[in-house]
Every structure is written in C-alpha cells, then in structure tokens.
Amino acid sequence: MNRPQKTHWRARAVLLLPSLWLLLFFLVPFVIVVKISVSQTVLAQPPYAPVLDLAAGWRGVEVFFAQLTAEGYRLIVTDPIYLLSYFKSLQVAAISTAILLLIGYPIAYGIARAPRSLQPLLVMLVVLPFWTSFLIRVYAWINILQRDGLLNDLLLGLGLVRGRPEWLSSDAAIYVGVVYSYLPFMVLPLYATLEKMDEALLEAAADLGCPRWKTFWLVTLPLSLPGVAAGVLLCFIPIVGEFVIPDLLGGSRTLMIGQTLWTEFFANRDWPVASAIAVALLALLVVPIVVYQRLQTRQLEDLR
Amino acid sequence: MRRTSSFNIVAVALGLAFLYLPIAILVIYSFNASRLVTVWGGWSLAWYRALLHDHAMLAAASISLRVAALSATAASVLGTCAAIALTRLGRFRGRLLFSGMVYAPLVMPEVITGLSLLLLFVALDVDRGFWTVVLAHTTLTMCFVTVIVQARLVGFDRSLEEAAMDLGCPPLKTFFAITLPLIAPAIAAGWMLAFSLSLDDLVIASFTTGPGATTLPIRIYSEVRLGVKPEINAICTIMVAVVALGTIVASLMTKRGHARRERAALAAQV
C-alpha cells in the first residue's frame, strides 16, 4: 500500500520541476508579451504604460484596463511597412522551403540507398555542420559573396561576368544563406522515413515491370510523405522568424518580420509595437506549430 | 538487392560539397598572411596571434563558455525529468499543455522567445546580465535534451527495470542503478547539443543580456557587421575545430559503447 503512493509522489516531482520552469519561463512571458502589445508607448523606464498597480486595489485594476489600447495592432495592419515585411517573410520561407525540399530529397534518398555500413558516417557528415555555429556558417558566405569575394573571382576567371557584380545585400543572398543553414533540418527527417521503407515494395514494383521513375512516383514518394511534412515544417516555421541570415546577407530595402521586430525593439524602443508584431507572428505560425507537434508526438508514439 | 546508382552518388557528393566548401574556404583563409581577405599572401598564423591580444574577444569567449556549461547542465536535468514524465507517467492531467510547452520552443522563432523572456525579466525587475542569459538558454535548450532522451527512453528494454524491482530494488535505486546508466549516452548527447546551441545563440542572448555580459556571438556579430576580418576567420576556425573534435570523440565513444554492449550480450548468450 505504501510503495505505490511513494512512487506517485516522486513521479509528481519529476513532472513538477520542468512544468514550473516552463510555466515561468515560457508561458508567463507570452502572457506578458500579449499584455504589453495592448499597452501604450511612453518615455519612461520601462517604456510602456499602464503598469498594473496592485497596491491601489480594485481601483488600480480598473485604471489599468481603461488604459489598454489596440494602437499597436492598428499600426501593424495599416502601415504597409509591417504588411510588406510579413509578406516578405512568408515569401522567403515558402520559396526556400521548396528549394530545400528539391535539394534535400535527392541527398536523403542517396544516403538511404547507400551501403548500410556507410550510412551512419554520411548522416554524421550531414549533421556536423548543424553543430557548428549558425553565425559562422552565415559569415562563411560573406567571404564568398562579397564584391571582391571568391564567387566573383571564379566567375571572372571563367569569363562569365564582366566587372564585379554585387551578390550580397540581395534576396538571392538570403536564399543561399537560408538553404545552406537549414539543409540538415530537411535531410534528416526525410532520411529517417526513407531509411525505414520496406525495399520489398520496390522489388515487387520492379518485378511487375514498373519503370523506376513510376515506382518512385507511386511508391517511394507517397510513403515518404510524413518525412516531407516534418522536414517542411521544421524549416518553414523558424525561417519565417529568421533574423541573422537576412540581417547579414540581405539588403535593407524590405526587411523580414524578425528584423522589423528587432528594429522596433532595439532602435525605436517601441516595446508595444514590437510585442504586437510578436503576437501577430505567433498567430501566423500557430497552425503549423500545432501540426508539427502532432507529427512529433505521433512519431514517438509509433516508436513505442 | 541494393543498387547504388550514379545519380545517388552524385546527389550525396554534391550535397556534402555544398555543406562543407564554405566552411573549408573560411578555414583556409584564416591562415592567410594577407590583410586583404581575398588576396592570398601565403600561410601564416598572424591572425591567431592577434586573437591572443584581443582581450574583449577573449572575455566574451570566457563568458560564453561559462553560460553554455551552466545552462547545458541545468537543461540536462530539466530535460531528462521532462522526458521521463512524458514516457513514464502515461496520461496525466495537463499532458497536452505540458508536451506543447516542451516541443514549442524547438521551432519557435528566436525573436519571439528572446523578446518574451526579456519582458519577463523587466516585469520581475531583474537586473539583466550573465544569469538572465543562463536562464534563457536553459529554457531554450532543455527541449532539445527532452527530445533526445525521450527517443532513448521509448526505445529501451524495460524488462531490466522490472527485473530489478521484482528482486526488491526500490524504485529510486532502480532509477540510479539501471535506468540512468542506460540513458546516460542520450543525456550526454543532449548536454553537448545544449552546450553548442548556447554557444551559438545570438538572438536570445542579445535580448536577455545586460552590461558586462557580452557573449561571443554578440561580439562576433558586431564585428561581422563591419565587414570580413581575418581575425574573425581565425576565431571561427577555432570554434569549428572544437565542435568537430567534440563530435568525433562523442561518436567514437558511443561506437565503443555499442561494441561493448554487443560483446556483453554475446557473452550472456554463451
């Protein structure tokens, strides 16, 4: 009688510790972001009003609610700067995710069809860059893409360009940086599903006289769709909010939403608008995030 | 029947070349004697020597290493607890919310996590600096530890634990004597991933840091914005070398562990 109860208590402790941590440092901060997104900007420390004054009792709460405003949200839906920046983020995320899928699929397929003994090494080679700093990998491309960089040296040497075209500060540079940085995120989930696939199915198709491209289209691709979904979401969601890549490689004409948020916060010190942008960005990503979580949970459940 | 077509080989080779060429170029040019980044002036260690005298950079590196070690350790403890809760407690109340909070930071854009944590610290009136970055990085990285440890917990043989308990071993002792050693490689891998993510993070650290706590990525970022410098190539090369070495050592260790376990299993059968 005694023991199960004790286990129960300990089991609770195991749950309680991470729960409290995530509540305090993940969930509560969001509530604060939402609250500040409906506050007003003031020249003070902290630079927003109202601040909830609990010492004033019920009166304080009333004053607090009376001062809330949707000004931040009104601004981000009416000022084209913000809408353009949302649109640009979605565009960059969608196009680069498509490119990632087109590049990542053959790589994952090639690894999954390589000799078994070689596969762990190949997977490690794909993962290794993911362990190296993001910042370093983006910086490496500045070395290559800058005006007197190696790409122009190569193109000039081959006689393909005249003069030295500017590659940095362009959308093309953003796409190169994003595809380069996120490639492991696309290849790994694809490889995980392709590697599990039963090869007897492919043999059966071949025996029945199905050409290889058709087998791929009718058998391999449909069976790998869970991996495709995982890879696409794992890339698309963070790319929408990306800051470092567009900031270092992109131009300053149209900013991505992550950069706009950063500028509002650090340069303009407009905390309510920055918070409103964050809330709107999250609203945009809530559906893909929930779908991703479903996939993640189902995958771990399948393992069991 | 496993046929490796030339298309597959070309795809993998090109993919790996794309992944490694830029880093290789960066490493090679860190040994360039010329101040001009694109003109090759012969081999030299000048930029590594210059780094030794860059006190701001060294201070930032030391702060980053301490933040990474502390937050990775805290994240390993919290992440392992969360993984155990998710795999062993079955359907408890609030499970959906809990798993949501665990997985969301994995894909959450960093600007949102950074901004929300900063606003929390402001609301709590906490002075920002070293410790707020540690707290922020712990929150970010514990979820990665959870995913790695959870995969290991799901995939392992529970009969060992049951055998120990049947023989009268109390649950807590069973955990430390059986479960923990079995999931230790996953926790170690999680710790390393947490460490490297913390060492790498620019955005969340920029939001949550304060005066006197400039981390290495913040320092590198402010230099990079001004253009390419050979010193930056040098410090990046050092970081790449450390990570490569760590990954190779870790993979050798797990391989040896595998071999040992297989030998033990074989011996048990004989």
Image: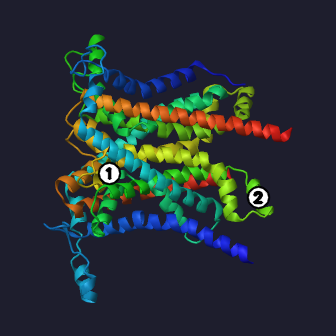
The label nearer to you, 1 versus 2, is 2
Q: Nearer the viewer, residue B196 or A175?
A: B196
Q: Is residue A194 visible?
A: no
Q: Position of residue B175 (x, y in %)?
A: 66, 59
Image point (22%, 62%), residue name:
A271
Q: Is residue A38 above or below residue A64?
A: above
Q: Nearer the viewer, residue A225 or A268?
A: A268
Looking at the image, which residue sits at the far bottom? Answer: A58
Residue to which mark 2 is pinned = B164
Residue to which mark 1 is pinned = B205
- Going by the image, does A139 lie left or right of A124? left
Q: Position of residue A66 (x, y in %)?
A: 22, 80
Which quadrant of the figure has residue B211? bottom left
Q: Is residue B16 above or below residue B203?
A: above
Mark nearer the N terminus (1 vs 2):
2
If the image is split into quadrants, where does the N terminus of chain A sit? bottom right
Image point (19%, 56%), residue name:
A79
Q: Is residue A12 visible?
A: yes
